[in-house]
Image (cartoon, helix red, strand yellow):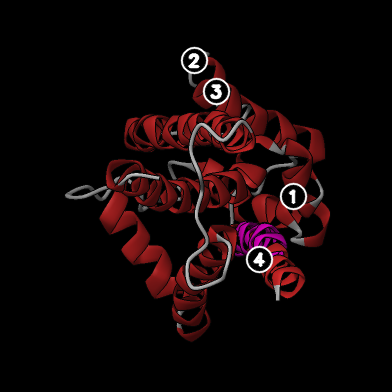
Amino acid sequence: MNKEARLIDKIMTIVFIVVLVLFILSCSIFMPLMNRRFYYDQIDGLNIVEVLNNYTHEDYNKEDVIEAFDDVMDFIWKGSEFKTGKLKFSESGKSHFEDCVPLFWLDFIVFIITSILMVAFLILHITKTIRIQDIRGMSPLFYGGIITIGLVIILGIFGVVSFDLLFEYFHKVFFPGKDNWVFDPRYDEVILILPEKFFMRCAILIGSTLFVLSGVAITYGIIKKKKLA
């Protein structure tokens, strides 16, 4: 193999690791974004209907909560008119969900692109068009898994120390210069059906999915090394 071919393989190996990390991250984030059942299952456990009625002094039921949530998700994913069922919302609250749309779709697009690239890498490697090289005897899958878990551990430690602070910094990073993500439940009742504990559980689901996918990659790398030893 000539030097140019070896260089290309090294570059492709690095690119593969980056794609793998982005695939695991986007796939993990995608889990709560598209899984409406995950939200429905939280309604009773988080006493969302009770909290909503105690604050608004209305008589909403679980179906009203689901309708409001579905309206918001339909707005984000289907481009439907912005609604929150029977709940009140303000223009400021609406604008925040408008800001969320590109972020949701960005994750979806990254997930689709990296999924396609992962399949392409596999085909190219099997056909020996390119060679995804081991690094110091370990599969690139091992390093991709380690990098991804390292990132989530750092965020996880931050979240355990202060989830409120992590939540705040997240919004400041992804919504720079804006404060429309700070809802006033008097005018945006929808925030009452999206409590902080729900987002915490979303973070747990994302972290769990990430650990499973990264664990599979790391395990494969270890098993492969033992077979070659």
Q: Secondary structure at mark 2?
A: loop
Q: Residue at x 80, y 40 (%)?
A: 62
The residue tagged 4 is: 221
Query: On the rendered structure, is 192 left or right of 107?
Result: right
| Residue position for label 1 | 49
Identify the residue shown where x is 27% and y is 56%: 173
Q: Position of residue 218 (x, y in %)?
A: 65, 67
Earlier along the polypeptide chain: callout 2 or callout 4?
2
Q: Secondary structure at mark 1?
A: helix
| Residue denoted by label 2 | 79
**Image depth: mark 2 or mark 1 in front:** 2
Q: Identify the main secondary structure in magenta.
A: helix
Secondary element type, mark 4: helix
Q: Secondary structure at mark 3?
A: helix
Answer with mark 4 or mark 3, whichever residue precedes in sequence.
3
From the image, tell me which residue sits under label 3: 77
Q: Which residue is depicted at the point 58% across and 62% down? A: 139
Compared to 215, does 36 lie above or below?
above
For residue 11, side relative to residue 79 (left or right): left
Residue 92 numbered tag: none
Task: Pick the residue in front: 149 or 130.
Answer: 130
Q: Amino acid at mark 4?
A: Gly
Give the residue type that dot 2 points to.
Gly
- From the viewer's perspective, is residue 219 above or below residue 69? below
Q: Earlier in the sequence, mark 2 or mark 1?
A: 1
Q: Choose mark 2 or mark 4, whichever is in front.
A: 4
- Reading the chain from its start, which is encountered first: label 1 or label 3? 1
Q: Quadrant of residue 44?
A: bottom right
